[in-house]
Image (tube, rainbow, N blue to C red):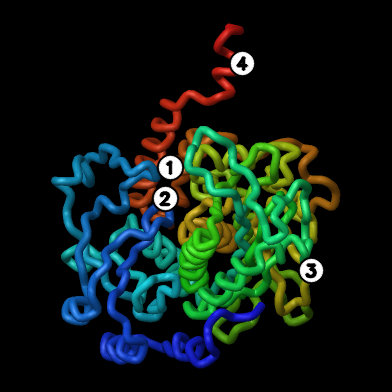
Amino acid sequence: MKPKHSKAKRENSLDRGVSTLEEAQAWFARQSIEEIECVVPDLAGVARGKIMPVRKFLGTPSMNLPLAVFYQTITGDFPEFEGAVNAVQSDTDIFLTPDFATLAAVPWAQDPTAQVIHDAFHPDGRPVEEAPRQVLRRVLALYAEKGWNPIVAPEIEFYLVDRNTDPDYPLKPPVGRSGRPETGRQGYSISAVNEFDALFEDMYEYSERQGLEIDTLIHESGVAQMEINLRHGHPLELADQVFMMKRTIREAALEHEIYATFMAKPMASEPGSAMHIHQSIVDRKGRNLFSDEDGQETPLFHGFIGGQQKYLPAIMAILAPYVNSYRRIARDSGAPVNTQWGYDNRTCGLRVPPSDPANRRLENRIPSSDANPYLAIAAVLATGYLGMVDELTPSAPVETDAGVEGVQLPRSLSESLALFKACQPLVDILGPTFIAAYDRVKQAEYETFMRTISPWEREFLLLNV
């Protein structure tokens, strides 16, 4: 794809390697940055924070926000939360500290603007346990104690849809450069991707300027459904990249009068969108712990699979975080709906892709694309960790269609939340404060949904019951 900006400007925008405030100040000067977005991912993966002039940021790089940012629902409400949040006015302040390793340009901004992701702390210096980045850090600390280093590679599916300003109307595929929308599924079609060539040019340019490493872009099986694969790496870095990539894709699409949506099931007749997570574990020397010296599978590999099998139902509240997410978890939906595993078997919730021993890994195919990347990666790694330390044994690998056994996962958010908060090993790993906060926020979102009457109810119940 032909870049829109000059090579010199692209190289200048990638001049990073920042780790301190002094290095950030020099970076701002080289980039002529005027404003900075100080962001923190909330429970939904939404960017919260403040925008300020660079001169103010350099004077006081640590800023404060109310703790309530981690208790806000996707509808913008604040649930009652005794002991933590009763009302926004009585909420306590937390302090945000920039992680300069995440400093990057905001390429779609009109004025020269930068962004940096922050970590959240209480006034006494304790990390905020409700913060998704801290939840992931907590899991990674357990791995570090064992001398283990997880490696992940997310795959993110999303739909391009026509602008939709009235939520009462169903979504429609957008019009491409041919002047026509897709009318049939075009899985892996190059020409179907090229329909939106200008949009993807901008997306690649924006990604490059932020240091986001896209591995591949493909057309998925749904109408105008795409998939972005990111290169493998450290879990926190990859979670940051997914967080930033979602913003990037949405912004690039909006500039072309198109919406990009990461809803799990945006259109009833089309497949759902997933966020598959490839995972492997290496030791301090970089050797894959899933393979022994002879290239054979190790007990740690089997334990990792066994842990994910055992605890998948309990983490569904994170992997499928909204009522819409469970529209994807249905038979004949194209999504795996089970806790089975197999070799290169895409009907299984857990797939072992073909690879050599050095690259042996497990792909968790259950998370939907609406999941918070920090929490989804933390959850799957937590279950794998439990399987390894408890030396769990997985079931036999499935070689046929794993879907014939039916749905083996929770079918609703309320059912998932009940399993989630009742699973003590996960409470211990992810933290009781986070578990309680997440449960309260998701319960509030579910109650909001239950107050909405759907067209299905009006169509089939209005005059028939």
Q: Which numbered tag is attached to residue 43?
A: none
Whole-percent x and y of residue 465? 58, 7
> Which mark sits nearer the N-terminus, 3 or 4?
3
The residue mark sitting in front, 1 or 3, is 3
> Which mark sits nearer the N-terminus, 3 or 2?
3
Q: Which residue is mark 4?
A: 460
Report crowding for label 3: few under 14, some 14 to 19, many 20 or more residues within 10 A (C-alpha): few
Q: Which residue is mark 2?
A: 427
Q: Secondary structure at mark 2?
A: helix
Q: Amino acid at mark 2?
A: Val
> Which mark sits nearer the N-terminus, 1 or 3?
3
Q: Amino acid at mark 3?
A: Pro
Residue pictured at 45% horizontal, 40% vertical? 422
> Which mark sits nearer the N-terminus, 1 or 2?
1
Q: Is residue 208 visible?
A: yes
Identity of the residue furthest to the right in this view: 400
Is residue 391 depicted above or below 140 in this figure? above
Q: Which residue is mark 3?
A: 354
Q: Which residue is mark 1?
A: 421
Whole-percent x and y of residue 68? 25, 50
Residue pictured at 54% horizontal, 39% vertical? 324
Residue pictured at 44% horizontal, 64% vertical? 136
Whole-percent x and y of residue 154? 60, 65
Q: Amino acid at mark 4?
A: Phe
- Residue nearest the observer in this picture, 299 or 271: 271
Q: Do residues under tags 1 and 2 come within 8 Å of each other at their CB atoms?
A: yes
Whole-percent x and y of residue 367? 59, 52
